[in-house]
């Protein structure tokens, strides 16, 4: 690979934010997993992911991402998801290492959607493009949701975001909003009755966790106690009462941020939220700066993916949303999540290098 | 060709417009996250910190060792030994998971699971605390087994607690008393003062009287509890402070001797130093092994004690009984003081005394002949005292009895001490709504009728008679020591008034008492010693009134007479007063006096009673 003058244009801010987040993630895992085997594994994933990110960043994404390759990966993903669904598992085991294809599905969908929008470049979304997007989105969404409802929802959000990003005419948007509102009012109670009890309980536990303190509300209650008791400065590294005494369930995965907020307090937690905000803002700024249509769509997709991941996770822990089982990028444990997010950032870096060049 | 449009600033790219919109939307969401974080951590931070503390920090009370009780030579009468109790946390032991743990425990304890579970449910109901004690007094093997399986028994804890220990068993039961576990009702009452379900309370004797001083101060331990209920770390600890220790005036040697002398009988022995009222021994027989109260009674043992006609739980040293002839000392003093008689005045005893149409018999049916005061005390002539009593009258006699300390508690301070009863006109009116009969005065004059005194009261009275007239409050604790052995409190003899009599009166009464032991016809000759002059007075108190005197041995146990003997020695300079009371023992001279004699011989000559 030639390191020409392009390599100098790599975006420093993006790398800086990611590195700080990785440091926070490493510290948090050191505490949440008590520095055990999982911590060492996570460090290996961080190293691997960082190398992958830099490799992608330094490569030429336009040459790398041929439509044929993207659709090839897409079809391969569908095949893997189908096989896993038939085997009733979320995990693909390769040489003793577990990989979650549903995580990779996010990146694959972003690439596929971006390619479609790039191919059918228009000011607004026409019906045909919408149809193609939907047709391409639903097989993986359904296949993922069958095994993991929360990740399926995540894919659906990315799909929806792309639809809006492609440009829904304003009249249609307003019409849709009205229909959704009317449907919510008229059909809402009926849908509520149709919902399965455990689904209802999840919503009920969100509305009133105290009433479900021992089962469904336990997780959110302990998360709130952990976050709240952090106060301004927190308990200090490895000193969190809730995490050290194992009151926090899923403390190294879904509720990793609660551990962080408890131990580093408002100062640390606000820093992490700020870093995510800054990272997403930087990605969107780059998307505005980059003039190359495929690149900027991918950039926007990466930003949106990280936004939804962060918002669903943080919103759940801070009790703005029902708790969903999705990892927080860089802070939660999980090899697939680390790899996917770092690969996405690598792609963004690669695109950012070509901000001012045209081919 | 589209790129031309992009570069024209007046018409922005719609995609860029949507990106800017996205930025605003996302910024709004992040502001929301940030505000919620601020609300949780800064505004509600203290609230959640309190919740976290309440959830994961627990305070355990550490029971304090009770103070020790020593006799006057420093021999331990009550101490502590460690014992292991099994405690479980009801917050963790519940539901199917709790059953699982209880099953494992049942296996270790060698018990059936259902019975353990039932015991657990019962124990849990009583207490609102975070600990339910499932078993006391575990042996070391069981403790080791549980400790080794600690990991599989969350919420289960072994508590090491100091347990009361009484080296002398039943011999000091009535003096030292005992402790037993707090019951549910008391717990409800005392919980605000920091008592918990595994506390002991002093129930009788010194343990009850000095309960607050002996108890000590509880320690506290602040620990971190993890989500599974295991203690992870001790955050802070405040060590318990041992209670204060008592040093007694009582000598365990005399105490055990006195206890042994009453072997096989029911009764009490009080040994007092007449010079200041200190108790050398206070025995009530039979006693109970106090360890039963500490560890819990086997039902059979409890049934046995409850049904025993010798009433082992009753402290006879300060229960009230008719004093019999021992009361003649009071009548004699009243007669001399009221100048009804002089020491030289004689009466003729022909075996009975007639008052109106009633006949009052002397215990010796053939009479004593001419008797003066000293002789009457020597032979315990009833007729002399009938006559004297009639002339003194109940008003004066009851006043004298009260001045001698009868009819009210002695001031020893033990819980359960009886006041006894000195009857008079007002009492008769109050209780029976009838006027006083003259015949009753005669009965009271020889210590019968409604009159009731305690052995301790007699010891106090006799001490005053022989020490020149000073009533001392009986006492048995000299010092209170802190855990380091420093003296915190010291007790001194306390005067409780003077006998309202002239020294001359005391001289003649004493002379009569010496004659009662040493005289040829003395009733208390069984207590005589060769080279030390003993003075004393016997007493035989009828339990049921009878027309004819029947020998006690022929009566059923519960109808036999009470035997009394009170003595002092040496007569010239008394240093010891002993009161022996044998319940349903029969004749004072033959049942009680020999016991006093044996004690005095052991005391003065070191003769070991066979």
Image: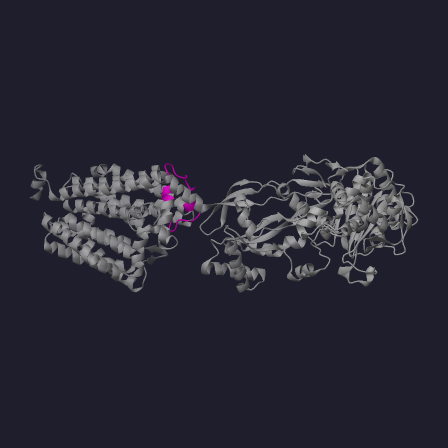
Residue B399 lies, in percent from the top left, at: 74, 42
Q: Is residue B340 visible?
A: yes
Figure quadrant of residue B248 = top right
Q: Position of residue B364 (x, y in %)?
A: 87, 55
Direction front: furthest residue: B356
Estimate the x, y position of residue A180 in percent, counting from the top left.
17, 54
Q: Which residues are magenta?
A: A226-251
Is the N terminus of chain A in the top left, top right, bottom left or bottom right quadrant?
top left
- Relative to B24, does residue B312 appear above or below in the rendering? below
Split into 4 quadrants, where in the image is the C terminus of chain A? top left
Relative to A313, residue A198 above or below = below
Location of residue B223 in the rendering, given as x and y in whole percent from the top left corner: 50, 44
Query: Does the stretch in magenta take in A235?
Result: yes
Viewer-nearest residue: B472 or A50: B472
Residue A172 falls inside the magenta stretch? no
| Number of numbered tags placed on the structure image | 0
Magenta stretch secondary structure, dominant: loop
Left or right? Give the position of B340 relative to B70: right
Q: How is the image coloured?
A: one colour
- In-front residue for pair A184/B25: A184
Would residue B366 appear left or right of B220 to someone viewing this image?
A: right
Q: Residue at x 71, y 43 (%)?
A: B410
Q: Depth check: B522 or A136 in front?
A: B522
Q: Nearer the viewer, residue A278 or A67?
A: A278
Residue A252 visible within the image: no
């Amino acid at each position: 690979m030639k390191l020409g003058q392009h390599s100098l244009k790599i975006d420093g801010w993006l790398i800086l934010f990611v590195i700080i987040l990785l440091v926070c993630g490493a510290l948090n895992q050191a505490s949440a997993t008590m520095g055990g085997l999982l911590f060492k594994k996570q460090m290996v994933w961080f190293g691997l992911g960082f190398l992958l990110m830099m490799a992608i960043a330094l490569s030429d994404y336009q040459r790398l991402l041929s439509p044929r390759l993207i659709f090839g990966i897409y079809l391969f993903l569908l095949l893997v998801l189908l096989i896993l669904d038939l085997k009733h598992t979320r995990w693909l085991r390769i040489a003793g290492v577990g990989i979650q294809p549903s995580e990779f599905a996010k990146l694959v969908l972003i690439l596929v959607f971006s390619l479609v929008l790039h191919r059918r470049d228009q000011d607004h979304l026409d019906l045909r493009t919408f149809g193609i997007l939907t047709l391409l989105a639903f097989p993986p969404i359904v296949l993922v949701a069958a095994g993991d409802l929360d990740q399926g929802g995540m894919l659906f959000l990315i799909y929806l975001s792309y639809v809006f990003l492609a440009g829904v005419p304003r009249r249609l948007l307003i019409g849709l909003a009205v229909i959704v509102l009317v449907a919510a009012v008229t059909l809402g109670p009926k849908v509520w009755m149709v919902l399965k009890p455990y689904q209802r309980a999840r919503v009920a536990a969100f509305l009133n966790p105290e009433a479900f303190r021992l089962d469904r509300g336990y997780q959110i209650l302990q998360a709130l106690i952990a976050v709240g008791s952090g106060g301004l400065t927190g308990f200090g590294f490895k000193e969190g009462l809730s995490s050290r005494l194992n009151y926090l369930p899923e403390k190294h995965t879904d509720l990793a941020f609660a551990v962080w907020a408890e131990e580093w307090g408002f100062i640390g937690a606000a820093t992490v939220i700020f870093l995510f905000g800054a990272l997403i803002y930087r990605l969107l700024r780059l998307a505005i700066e980059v003039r190359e249509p495929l690149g900027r769509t991918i950039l926007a997709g990466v930003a949106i993916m990280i936004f939804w991941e962060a918002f669903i996770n943080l919103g759940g822990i801070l009790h703005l949303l029902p708790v969903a089982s999705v990892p927080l990028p860089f802070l939660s444990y999980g090899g697939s999540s680390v790899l996917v997010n770092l690969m996405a950032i690598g792609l963004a870096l690669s695109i950012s290098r070509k901000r001012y060049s045209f081919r | 060709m589209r790129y031309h449009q992009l570069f024209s600033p007046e018409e922005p790219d719609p995609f860029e417009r949507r990106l800017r919109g996205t930025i605003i939307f996302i910024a709004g969401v992040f502001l929301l996250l940030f505000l919620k974080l601020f609300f949780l951590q800064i505004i509600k931070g203290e609230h959640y910190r309190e919740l976290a503390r309440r959830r994961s920090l627990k305070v355990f009370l550490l029971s304090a060792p009770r103070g020790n009780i020593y006799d006057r030579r420093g021999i331990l009468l009550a101490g502590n030994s460690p014992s292991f109790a099994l405690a479980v946390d009801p917050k963790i032991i519940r539901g199917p998971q709790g059953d699982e743990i209880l099953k494992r425990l049942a296996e270790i304890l060698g018990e059936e699971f259902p019975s353990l579970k039932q015991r657990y449910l019962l124990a849990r109901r009583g207490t609102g605390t975070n600990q339910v004690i499932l078993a006391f007094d575990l042996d070391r093997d069981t403790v080791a087994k549980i400790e080794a399986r600690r990991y599989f028994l969350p919420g289960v804890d072994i508590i090491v607690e100091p347990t009361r220990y009484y080296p002398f068993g039943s011999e000091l039961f009535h003096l030292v008393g005992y402790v037993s576990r707090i019951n549910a009702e008391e717990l409800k009452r005392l919980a605000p003062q920091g008592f918990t379900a595994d506390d002991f309370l002093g129930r009788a004797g010194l343990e009850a009287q000095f309960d607050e001083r002996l108890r000590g101060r509880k320690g506290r331990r602040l620990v971190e509890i993890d989500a599974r209920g295991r203690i992870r770390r001790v955050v802070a600890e405040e060590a318990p402070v041992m209670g204060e220790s008592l040093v007694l005036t009582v000598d365990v040697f005399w105490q055990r001797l006195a206890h042994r002398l009453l072997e096989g009988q029911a009764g009490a022995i009080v040994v007092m130093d007449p010079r200041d009222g200190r108790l050398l021994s206070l025995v009530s027989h039979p006693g109970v092994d106090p360890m039963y109260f500490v560890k819990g009674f086997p039902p059979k043992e409890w049934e046995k004690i409850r049904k025993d006609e010798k009433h082992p739980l009753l402290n006879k040293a300060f229960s009230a009984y008719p004093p019999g002839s021992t009361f003649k000392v009071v009548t004699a003093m009243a007669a001399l003081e009221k100048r009804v008689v002089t020491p030289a005045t004689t009466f003729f005893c022909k075996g009975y005394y007639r008052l109106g149409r009633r006949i009052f018999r002397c215990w010796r049916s053939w009479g004593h002949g001419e008797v003066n005061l000293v002789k009457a005390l020597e032979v315990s002539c009833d007729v002399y005292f009938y006559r004297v009593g009639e002339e003194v009258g109940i008003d004066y006699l009851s006043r004298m009895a009260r001045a001698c300390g009868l009819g009210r508690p002695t001031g020893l301070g033990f819980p359960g001490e009886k006041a006894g009863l000195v009857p008079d006109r007002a009492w008769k009116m109050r209780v029976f709504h009838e006027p006083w009969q003259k015949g009753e005065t005669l009965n009271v004059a020889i210590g019968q009728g409604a009159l009731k005194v305690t052995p301790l009261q007699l010891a106090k009275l006799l001490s005053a008679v022989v020490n020149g007239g000073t009533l001392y409050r009986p006492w048995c604790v000299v010092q209170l020591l802190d855990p380091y052995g420093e003296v915190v409190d010291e007790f001194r003899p306390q005067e409780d008034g003077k006998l309202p009599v002239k020294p001359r009166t005391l001289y003649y009464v004493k002379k009569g008492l010496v004659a009662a032991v040493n005289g040829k016809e003395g009733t208390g000759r069984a207590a005589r010693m060769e080279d030390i002059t003993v003075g004393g007075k016997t007493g035989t108190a009828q339990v049921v009134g009878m027309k004819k005197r029947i020998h006690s041995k022929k009566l059923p146990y519960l109808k036999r007479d009470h035997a009394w003997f009170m003595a002092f020695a040496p007569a010239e300079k008394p240093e010891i007063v002993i009161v022996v009371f044998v319940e349903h023992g029969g004749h004072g001279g033959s049942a009680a006096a020999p016991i006093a004699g044996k004690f005095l011989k052991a005391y003065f000559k070191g003769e070991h009673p066979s």
